[in-house]
């Protein structure tokens, strides 16, 4: 299986344009914030001391969630390519089980999602440290890396479930476009969750997007929240609710609750993926049978 994982990683990182395209959704969210959103959000929270020190990590958290979605979706492209080209059917003839083959796609995609989040994280922290003197404590880095891994697992299982119904690259491109566009909205990057209608908020809350962004924000903003709201504690709840730092259910979710919710989504997506894996396996085996039972051009010539 490790040979297949290595193959998938080499194919992904060997396609430089594909790697850049997988980051496109996150880069769009980042640029939109810098060009359009940052000024308005700073004005909205001008009553706070140094609001940029809160809003910069707020954006980083949301953008990392978008990165996890788009890079894992792009990392699974090879699964669709293999399925369409018949390579998956060939692999099904080897000694490796079909579940093992599918698992190799999952493992490589989790690695891709984690690494690409690290790249975006380093780039954004570096940019804001130069422009806004943003400083991230070392104590926050380890838990952030842990959430990167969890995010990759959640969105890999989600994307595998979605792509279980995709049989060609044309459909894959359309789904990738939809995911990249919707991720920024559902993660509350283009608009904070508190700024959209209640119906839209309820729709966002039944997806993993806002919880993923929230847990990043809770870790990245923890120290600065204490400092900023020390003198105005009455504004903190409103700030966290409006900007999706905690998600309002019966009360604002903690990072522990968000972690459990994300893990729950991963279990549900994984269970559904196993159900549909049976159908995928049957299609692959049928393709093998078709390849080996169909008459060749030589057979037609002989007849």
Image: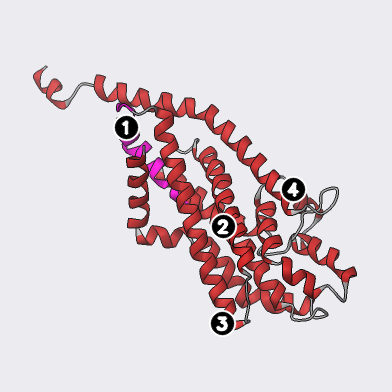
Is disc 3 surrounded by few (<14), some (14 to 19) or many (20+) residues within 10 Å?
A: few
Is disc 1 surrounded by few (<14), some (14 to 19) or many (20+) residues within 10 Å?
A: some
Q: CB of mark 2 within 8 Å of CB of mark 4?
A: no
Q: Quarter of the image containing the C terminus?
A: top left
Q: Name the residue under label 4.
A: 257
- The mark nearer the N terminus, 1 or 2, is 1
Q: Alpha-carbon distance for marks 1 and 3?
A: 49 Å
Q: Name the residue under label 3.
A: 130
Q: Is residue 161 left or right of residue 250?
A: left
Q: Mark 1 points at which residue?
A: 91
Chain part drawn in magenta: 74-95
* Residue 167 visible in the displayed image: no
Residue at the spot 34% in from the left edge and 46% down from the top edge: 6
**Secondary element at image label 3:** helix
Q: CB of mark 1 within 8 Å of CB of mark 3?
A: no
**Secondary element at image label 4:** helix
The front one of 63 and 145 is 145
Q: Which of marks 1 and 3 is in front?
A: 3
**Residue 109's spot in the image, x, y percent?**
46, 47
Q: Quarter of the image containing the N terminus?
A: top left
Above or below: residue 176 compared with residue 137: above
């Amino acid at each position: 299986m490790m040979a297949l994982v290595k193959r998938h990683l080499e194919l992904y990182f060997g396609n430089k344009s594909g790697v850049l395209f997988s980051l496109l959704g996150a880069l769009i969210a980042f640029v939109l914030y810098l060009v359009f959103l940052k000024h308005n959000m700073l004005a909205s929270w001008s009553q706070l001391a140094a609001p940029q020190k809160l809003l910069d990590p707020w954006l980083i958290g949301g953008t990392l969630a978008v990165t996890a979605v788009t890079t894992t979706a792009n990392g699974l492209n090879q699964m669709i390519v293999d399925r369409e080209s018949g390579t998956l059917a060939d692999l099904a003839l080897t000694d490796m089980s079909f579940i093992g083959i599918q698992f190799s796609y999952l493992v490589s995609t989790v690695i891709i999602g984690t690494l690409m989040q690290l790249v975006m994280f380093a780039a954004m922290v570096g940019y804001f440290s130069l422009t806004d003197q943003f400083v991230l404590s070392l104590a926050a880095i380890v838990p952030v890396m842990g959430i990167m891994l969890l995010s990759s697992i959640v969105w890999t299982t989600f994307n595998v479930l979605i792509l279980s119904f995709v049989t060609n690259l044309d459909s894959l491109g359309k789904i990738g476009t939809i995911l990249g566009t919707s991720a920024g909205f559902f993660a509350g990057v283009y608009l904070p969750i508190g700024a959209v209608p209640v119906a839209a908020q309820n729709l966002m809350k039944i997806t993993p997007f806002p919880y993923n962004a929230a847990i990043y924000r809770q870790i990245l903003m923890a120290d600065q929240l204490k400092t900023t709201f020390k003198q105005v504690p009455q504004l903190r709840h409103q700030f966290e609710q409006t900007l999706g730092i905690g998600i309002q259910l019966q009360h604002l979710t903690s990072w522990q609750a968000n972690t459990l919710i994300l893990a729950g989504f991963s279990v549900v997506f994984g269970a559904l993926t196993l159900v549909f894996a049976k159908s995928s396996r049957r299609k692959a085996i049928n393709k093998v049978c078709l390849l080996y039972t169909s008459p060749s051009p030589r057979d037609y010539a002989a007849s």
